[in-house]
Image (cartoon, rainbow, N blue to C red):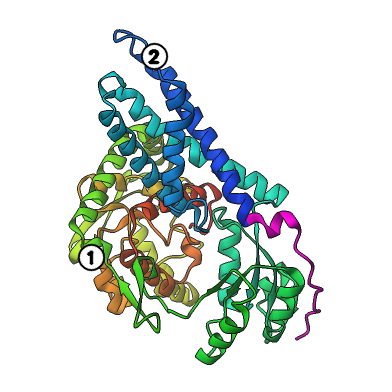
Amino acid sequence: MGIRRAKAQKIPFKEKYGYVILPILLAVLDYCAVLCAEQLSFTLRNLLITNHGVLRVSWLHFYVICPVIYLIFLNIEQTYTRQMQFWRIIANIFKAILYSVATGVFIMYVVQIADTTSRLYTTLLAIFSFFFIVLFRYIAKKSLMERIGILGEPLLLMGAGKTAEIILEHLQEDIGMSYRFIGYLEDHEPNRSVAEALPWLGKFADAEAVIRKTGVQKVMVAAPGLSQEQIQDVIYDLQPLVKTISFIPDMGTLPLNTMDIESLIDGHLVMFRMRNNLTNRANRFIKFVFDWVGTLAGGILISPILLIIALWIRRDSPGPIIFSQKRVGQNGKMFNCYKFRTMYKDAEEQLHDILEMDEGLRKEWEANFKLKNDPRVTRSGDFLRRTSLDELPQIFNVLKGEMSLVGPRPIVRKEIPYYGKYIDDYYMVRPGITGMWQTSGRSDTDYKERVQMDSWYVRNWNFWFDIVLLWRTMKVVIQQKGAY
């Protein structure tokens, strides 16, 4: 290995005991967030309702009972002790708040003070407490973790291949995963991005010495190529030295997001149980309601933008404002997918001539059904494509029940053979305005990756993951990453 080995350094006190400091800091932040939510809810209630007298809250309920209930359920949902992606933390915070509000209402009825408690105050408290807890945690983790380094738990990475590269990229970007990689161990040539980001501390055989030297208490094994015997050796040799060992096996493209793990025969065997969330009628109903309500509210807000874009297209080039194309929908049913027109009105005729004359462009079209430098695109269309604003008219497809806010990319009939055995996953749901493809490099990904993304989304659907993809879409659109 041509990379120079780095010297293992002793982990500083504030990082070594971050697992103790972090829960305390987060609990203090959550306590302050609940107090802010209570004060704002109390003030707004008295401003909005004046004909039922002034609401009064006892100091015991304000400073002790209410915040403690929140902290208990936040702890039950493991928001203090478990490292997880930030969108999962948000989902757990939401559940903790629901349980806290329900418990608070139950206590009011038990002590017979429900009649004197404002329903508006309770509703506002639930909304503002969620907002402030998420906001306080986000700010604290961004500032304390990135600037001071106090919230980053030291982690030793074993493996430096493609899996390690993916892990490193995603964990360092997600503020919910408060890890600081102290270095990596690798027996073979490391992945370039891993070698550039972290120091090489030795080979797998040096793991015990590195752990004793640094005092690191968390190890992540990201080497799917290890044999079962090698995995057992690593775990049994290192487990007495550290608090936790995380192991990432090679599970291919299995739907891991909906997987439950259960041990059998006193822990000698493990069973993986996989669910399909979208076969549940309640989940499908929740997704439909979220699509319809979110689209209706969002459509009203962006109506001025739609009008401005329509006027620009009409002024830029002759032809219709809206372009309609047949796409494959749920259960294979065809529908008219709406977009703002981004090409000249004779684009189909131009495409035939372009592909006939240029073999390179023909191969690009056959591979992706897209051209990166498409001469048929208008001036307004170039901007609309780069910003993905050309897809805004698809909100009408959502209101008609033909599309979803989040889902697989809507395809044309010619693309069906490219999906192969995964086409049934596509047929299971309505295609989406946005999805994993649009938030993962969009046109920079190849077609095989797009198919796998669509299949993964369907098999791992989660309501909160839809929220995350919508948020990521806004970031990608602003950055104009991979769009053409």
Which quadrant is the N terminus positioned in?
A: bottom right
Does 270 appear above or below 70?
Answer: below
Counting from the top left corner in percent of width and height, residue 396 is at: 26, 44
Q: Is residue 473 visible?
A: no
Whether residue 225 appears in magenta in the rendering, the answer is no
In the rendered view, tell whether residue 459 sits above or below residue 19.
below
Image side of residue 424 versus residue 240, left or right? left
Give the quarter of the image for residue 253.
bottom left
Vertical order, 337 against 458 (above or below)? above
Residue 236's image quarter?
A: bottom right
* Left or right of residue 382: residue 223: right
Magenta-span inclusion, residue 11: yes
Q: Which mark is residue 124?
A: none
State the separation of the CA atoms marked 2 and 1.
49 Å
235 or 322, which is in the foreground?
235
Q: Position of residue 350 (x, y in %)?
A: 39, 62
Mark number displayed over residue 46: 2
Which x, y percent locates residue 413?
A: 26, 69
Three-letter amino acid code of the residue under disc 2: Asn
The mark that comes first in sequence, 2 or 1, is 2
Secondary structure under the numbered disc 1 in the rendered image: loop
Task: Give SS at disc 2.
Answer: helix
Amino acid type, label 1: Met
Read off the magenta span: 1-18
Q: Main secondary structure of the magenta part?
A: loop
Of residue 458 and residue 177, the one placed in the foreground of this image is: 177
Give the residue at mark 1.
428
* Residue 121 drawn above or below residue 314: above
Q: How many marks?
A: 2
Task: For label 1, count other residues whose C-alpha is less than 10 Å away and answer few (under 14), some (14-19) or many (20+).
Answer: some
Is residue 223 at all visible to an observer of this figure?
yes
